[in-house]
Amino acid sequence: MQAGLWEGAVAALAIAVFSGWRDWRRARRENLDAVGIVDWPTVQILALIVAAILASIAFTA
């Protein structure tokens, strides 16, 4: 069970890194009218929260 929690924490951390990269690209887009539908900073924050929760549960398990 502990290995699954760590895997989930790593996956959430990977999503946070990916969303940070996508937000960086969105901020530097050339066509300012081409907006996306995903709010990448919110995705990044939620992924970091999930990673922290899963890591803390894995530490105590």
Image (tube, rainbow, N blue to C red):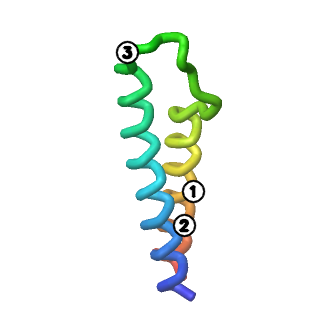
Image point 58% across, 27% down: which residue? 36
- On-image quarter of the C terminus: bottom right
Picture coordinates of residue 57, whole percent (x, y): 55, 71
Between disc 2 and disc 3, whose residue precedes? Answer: 3
Q: The residue under label 2 is which amino acid type?
A: Leu
Q: Nearer the viewer, mark 2 or mark 3?
A: 3
Whole-angstrom CA distance, mark 3 to mark 1, is: 33 Å
Asked if the residue under mark 1 is in contact with the one under mark 3, i.e. CB atoms within 8 Å, the reply is no
Q: Look at label 3 and name its amino acid.
A: Glu
> According to the image, label 2 marks what residue?
54
Mark 3 neighbour class, 10 Å CA radius: few under 14, some 14 to 19, many 20 or more: few
Which residue is label 3 attached to? 30
Nearer to us in this view, 31 or 8:
31
User: In terms of depth relative to the viewer, which is nearer, 11 or 56?
Assistant: 11
Callout 1 crowding tier (Cα within 10 Å): few <14, some 14–19, many ≥20: some
Assign a secondary structure to mark 2. Answer: helix
> Residue 50 has which mark?
1
Look at label 1 and name its amino acid. Val
Q: Quadrant of the N terminus?
A: bottom right
Which residue sits at x=44%, y=14%? 31
Q: Residue at x 58, y 35 (%)?
A: 42
- Seen in the picture, residue 61 relative to 37 is either above or below; the reply is below
Lower position in the chain sequence, tag 3 or tag 1: 3
Disc 1 element: helix
x, y percent for residue 44: 50, 42
* Disc 1 and disc 2 in contact, CB within 8 angstroms: yes
